[in-house]
Image (cartoon, rainbow, N blue to C red):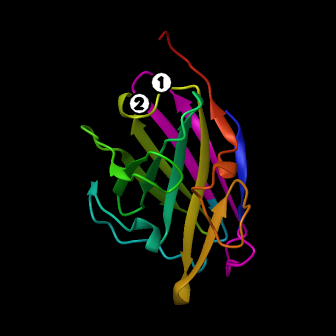
Amino acid sequence: MQTYELAAHNAHPPLAVRRVEARVLSLTDAWVRVRWRIDGLQKLVIPDFAGRGRADNLWQTTCFEMFVMPRDGTPGYSEFNLSPSERWAAYDFTDYRKGMTERVFSREPECVMRTGQSMAIFDASLPRDQMPEPPVSIGLSAVIEEEGGVKSYWAMSHHKEKPDFHDPACFGAGLARTRAA
């Protein structure tokens, strides 16, 4: 699977973070595994451990996000927010920022953050049976908070004056069908 270098939105530069990249590690019948890597974490704010569970507003601090849009021509898409605290959220939208509902998950995602001296790895495993079925377009992004409340917004691409991970133009990757229909 391909690694995507994410770009910080020009209006919200980071303090010390030099690079964020993301990739889908694997897609099996059981899990979709995704990894984000952050280089330059000297000022990174990592949310405190809170244990697994659904939570809203995760994007207000360091959070990793994946957007998934079916390639069947419908305007709907799903958003997955994953926190180093192990909290998570999942939403479905009927159209661009419209018709938001909680996406039902019977089995919780697994999230793990590992840090070193100059880089951090965030791994997330999402239950495959609760994800939109490929072929899909995906957008990988991250909100990175650093000391002093400084937030940078990282995405595969930015197309607006303000950060907008929901913008369909940001769904620059894809996943193909990997199992029989």
Report the mark closest to the observer, 1 or 2: 2
Q: Three-letter amino acid code at disc 2?
A: Arg
Residue 100 in the image: state x and y as whole percent: 38, 53
Determine whether the residue tagged by mark 2 lies in a helix, strand or loop: helix
Residue 170 in the image: state x and y as whole percent: 67, 51
Q: Residue at x 30, y 62 (%)?
A: 55
Q: Quadrant of the N terminus?
A: top right
Q: Three-letter amino acid code at disc 1?
A: Thr
Looking at the image, is 91 positioned above or below residue 174? below
Determine whether the residue tagged by mark 1 lies in a helix, strand or loop: loop
Q: Is residue 15 magenta?
A: yes
Q: Residue furthest bottom?
A: 148
Residue 61 in the image: state x and y as whole percent: 46, 73
Dots 1 and 2: beta carbons under 8 Å?
yes
The residue carrying mark 1 is 28
Looking at the image, is 4 positioned above or below residue 73? below
Magenta residues span 9-37
Dot label at residue 72: none
Marks 1/2: CA–CA distance:
7 Å
Please identify the quarter of the rendering in which residue 129 is found: top left
Q: Is residue 178 visible?
A: yes
Q: Nearer the viewer, residue 70 or 155?
A: 70
Tell whether 20 sits left or right of 69: right
First along the sequence among labels 1 and 2: 1
The residue carrying mark 2 is 128
Q: How many marks?
A: 2
Q: Nearer the viewer, residue 174 or 63?
A: 174
